[in-house]
Amino acid sequence: KGIVCKKEGVVIKTESRGRIKNLDQMPLPAWDKFPIKNYHDAGYSFTTRNRKAMPILAQRGCHYKCTFCTNPQMWGSNVYMRDPKCVVSEIKMYVEKYGIEHVDFCDIVGVINPRWTRELLNLMIEEKLNVTWIHGAGTRSEILDKEVLTLFKKSNALRVFYAPETGSEETIKKI
């Protein structure tokens, strides 16, 4: 399932492969197969220059259907989230193994579930991870409230990105 290939000039496509729903059952990336120290020594990371950083996926999917996004067509609109304890455990491992100072969350949407986000950020604060972090993707602004934004600050978020559909009332009506 999930394979497209060409055989004797004919394109062959198998049926779609189902999404993995329990992300906690997936193995962590095999970063030991890459020269991470070389990248860190050279000042490279995913989004933040001159910080020892590692990328992390904490969730997959998005239930929104923004007009500018291809996610619904590519993956559907289901959301699957890792247990926040597993995410924090992965961060702790990277701190110990690679001496990281920063985490780049590479999820499609920065904040999709306020309860899950509060749990993750509270765990990051409790564990005193001493790392900064960002979500490279936009966050839905209607999800954020004073409590979540306060937790962003306490958990060492460097910046928050927003992904508004539009800033125009006229365009909102057209959409």
Image: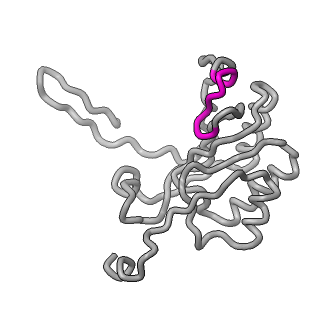
Q: Residue at x 36, y 50 (%)?
A: 74
| Quarter of the N terminus within the rendering | top left
Image label count: 0
The quarter of the displayed image where residue 17 is located? top left
Question: Does residue 95 lie above or below 129 as drawn?
Answer: above
Residue that appears at 56% across and 62% down: 162
Instruction: Report the coloring of the rendering.
Output: one colour
Q: With 16 as the anchor, is 100 left or right in this view? A: right
The residue that appears at 39% across and 78% down in the rendered structure is 172
Q: Is 93 placed left or right of 39 in the picture?
A: right
| Magenta stretch encompasses residue 42 | yes
Name the spot of residue 141 as percent of width and height, x first: 58, 69
Task: Tell me the magenta residue range.
Answer: 39-48
**The quarter of the displayed image where residue 54 is located:** top right
* Front residue of 150 and 5: 150
Would residue 138 appear left or right of 121 to someone viewing this image? left
> Residue 136 location in percent, x, y?
57, 48
Q: In the displayed structure, would residue 123 be above or below residue 175?
A: above
